[in-house]
Image (cartoon, helix red, strand yellow):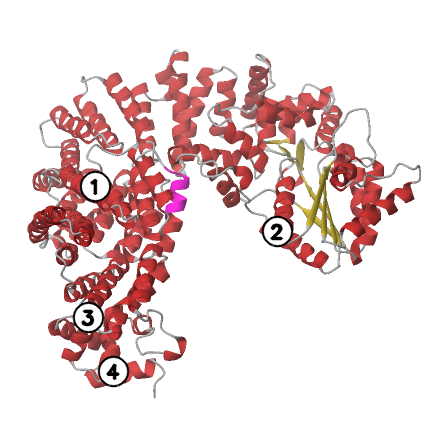
Amino acid sequence: MKARASDLFVGRAGELEALEGALDAARAHRGATVLIAGEAGIGKTRLTSELSARARDAGFEVLLGRSIDLVGTELPYQPFAQALRPVGALPRADGRQFRVFEHILGVLTERAESAPVLLVLEDLHWADISTLDLVVYLAQYVDDRPVLLVGTYRADERSSAERMLRLANGVRRSGSALLVDLGPLDRDDLAALVAAYAVPPRTAAIADAIVVRSDGNPFFAQELIAAAGDGGLPRGLRELLLQRVDRLDQRARAVVRIASAAGREVGYALLRAVAVMPEQDVRAALRQAVEHGVLVAEPATSSFRFRHALLAEAVYATLLPGEREEIHEHLAEELARSGAAAPAELAPHWAAAGRAAEALAASVAAAREAVSVAGLAEARAHLERAISLWPAVANAAEVAGSDLGGLCSWAAELASETGEGPRAVELARQAIGLAGVGDRRRAALLHVRLGEYLHEIGSDLSGLAALERAVELAPAEPSSDRAYVVASLAGGLMVAWRHAASVRLAEEALALARDAGAGEALVRALTVRGADLVYLGRTEEGLTDLGEALRLAEEIGERVGLDPVYVNVTDALTMLGRLRESVQVGRQGLEAIHRYGVDSAVLVSNLIEALFALGEWDEADALSTAALRSTMASYPYMLLMLRADLEVGRGDFVAAREHLDAALETLRPDRGLGIYDVCLAELALWERRWTDAVDHTNAALESMGSVEAAQLRVWFCAKGLRAQADLAAVARTRRVADAERSVLDRADQLIAVARRAAEDAAPVTPVSSAWLGLAEAEYERSRGVAGPGLWADAADRWAHLDRAPLTAYCQWRQAEALVTAGGSRAEASIPARSAYQVAVRIGARPLQRELELLAELARLRIATPPAEAEPAGGLDEVLGLTAREAEVLTLLSHGCTDREIAATLVISVRTVGVHVSHILRKLGAANRIEAAAIAHRMSGHS
């Protein structure tokens, strides 16, 4: 558990600000009386507790008293007696009320002479009349004293409503009153409260249900969390909720029970028709239920709703066996008779009434209607009900219009599309068992689905086996089905990084699909071949295939195939280093699939990955937070690993470790092709656990096996070399020659692997070249060579790819190397300042701290004074230049030659020439002189 919810204060920012203002006024001898009203559990006590803590910190003396609900007796001044007992000043029972009032005012005045006083009186709805009159009296006299009086009461207690109105009016007349009405917490605040109990990411759906069911009431939320594994209402909460119902007479309770079965909101006409009593009795019962705060009238819709959804649940739980079935049957019959209800409304009533045939027919009809409006999760729920009802209906296939295998297959597809991969696997296997192998075509297509669902949950080998079985079962003659099945097996090989084998099958499937005019198979074949070609270095051909697949999927409304196309396009663009394109396509893809009601953890993950690489960490953070709040059962480890990456980058190492631990529970056997181990290594590197980082990178390389993923291999080697460099530095400092020699031997091995991998990956992606540049620089660092030129080159490569975080990392190392090599502070300050600006902008606190430490030790200037207004400041944004191009333009505008610029930035003269060419093109300048003039004008120079 991260924190106790009782220690967490969420929401109420406006209310707390007003109360703190009242504290400030009281300190200045402008006392006031505050009344805080709200329903039970809404957070009145938590608000006053927070206020009390802040008051104590501000030097206030805090006095607290509570009224107690004692049946059959009233204790005069009970909350005052409790509040004043610690200071030895109890109310005097001398028979004259005015004397008592004066005495209490005198005590508070005396106490306030040494420190301002906060007097908190809780639960005034249970207080006696004398206590309430004393509160009104004090409200008239504290306005010129350093005293703040705060009282709380339940606004929804009918028995005390008249007294509370009198209290509020009396306090209001004092002229120094503040009345605070506490409403429900909003969804984000309540989600933060639930998160404080550390509900594991794998049960995010439960957390979301708690947020919805609690209706913004924090007490209700806490009770539901405590009973999260039970599914029902905790006994204490149920009893609290039913207190209101117990005050109703028999007729009102009967109507309320009908309403609980009907749903949270129910029309008057339906209640009147189902209730077995005269209409005037129904009206009287409803009026009583409204007056006691059980129901709320909705005049605009002529309906009634429960004040809280949980109250409806509590009442429903009181229905007896037989009574429940009878009420649901009457409700279903009346809804069917009126013709006003949709199948989705009828189905649960028929099911609860035990009318299985009617429930089955309505459930299937409701599923079809839900799909037509992109309500895929709702459609699956209806189908799950239909499947459970099947054994109870004699002619089920006739009633449902489908056999059971068809319903299972359909439900499996919907489970997959809504992120419930494990359930999709179960349903697909059930469908296969029902179908047998008599219908080979159907069996083949069912095995395709099973293979894909197995891949979703990380069972890649089983998934491939299912796809291979699908090809065996598919009719041998050319057909659209044959094309679809072969394309699916190609897709299984593609995601396993077996691109050479995959592309051959994809081309076979493509030919079959074109001959058969099969749109779905064509989309699938193009999607797979496109991804294969990109990863085989035939970039433009691959992107053309993917573009055609996307166009065709949209054109024919191929819902199932649309998500994989967008996933492969965004993955390819990110792999190619075209991050901003990937982000743009990712956003378009989410919008497109959401129109069909489809969720995609993979597409969301791809978008977050691209944003993170760009350094758009705030957007990545927001998207990641929203995604984890509704984590799906398919591919959850992806979202968790990306979240951990972000948290490592921002220095929240504890949260990163928690998310990596959670990811491990659903991780594939290949550990994400080793990427999971690299995430662990990144965390270890920033925590200075270099030996652990070495172990993790070694594990990552081993996890890859013989996979054709050279671009991953060079990345992993670069991370490993960073760890080796730090370990070598430690060994040299300690003068342990054997340890240093061992580290350097491993560094030699890693750089050799990195160079070979980069050579293999060079025709595929420019990103491998950037990783190799970083690896070469880390390798030299491991050997004790400063190498500022290597770091400048690595930073330049990452800058060309628009990857700000890695550019900043290399610039930090470049500045460090310049200092080590004896360069001037002015030289070292340039890359350090650039890196620092990025670190601050994106919130990379670990990197920011390293730069600040380097600046302190080497006396570097990493923050540009506002008055300095160097030409480079803002030129990247104003003129559309990269950070490196802005640096080059700044020096160029000062009259520096290419060689001087190269020496200052520690890059090659050739690289400077490339930058200058880019600058002239972007500025539309004819020559260097014109470019310098533009820079001066845009920087405010004459």
Residue position for label 1? 696
- Element type at marker 4? helix
- Element type at marker 3? loop
Cα gap from disc 1 to disc 4, whole angstroms:
47 Å
x and y percent of residue 836 in the render? 32, 64
Question: Tag 2 or tag 3, which sits nearer the N-term?
Answer: 2
Cα gap from disc 2 to disc 4, whole angstroms:
56 Å
Residue position for label 2? 57
Identify the image quadrant of the N terminus: top left
Main secondary structure found in the magenta portion: helix
Q: Does the magenta stretch include residue 30?
A: no
Residue position for label 4? 893
- Element type at marker 2? helix
Mark nearer the viewer, 2 or 4? 2
Pointer 2 with pointer 4, Cβ within 8 A: no
Cα gap from disc 1 to disc 3, whole angstroms:
34 Å
**Residue 435 relative to residue 27: left or right:** left
**Residue 880 relative to residue 734: left or right:** right
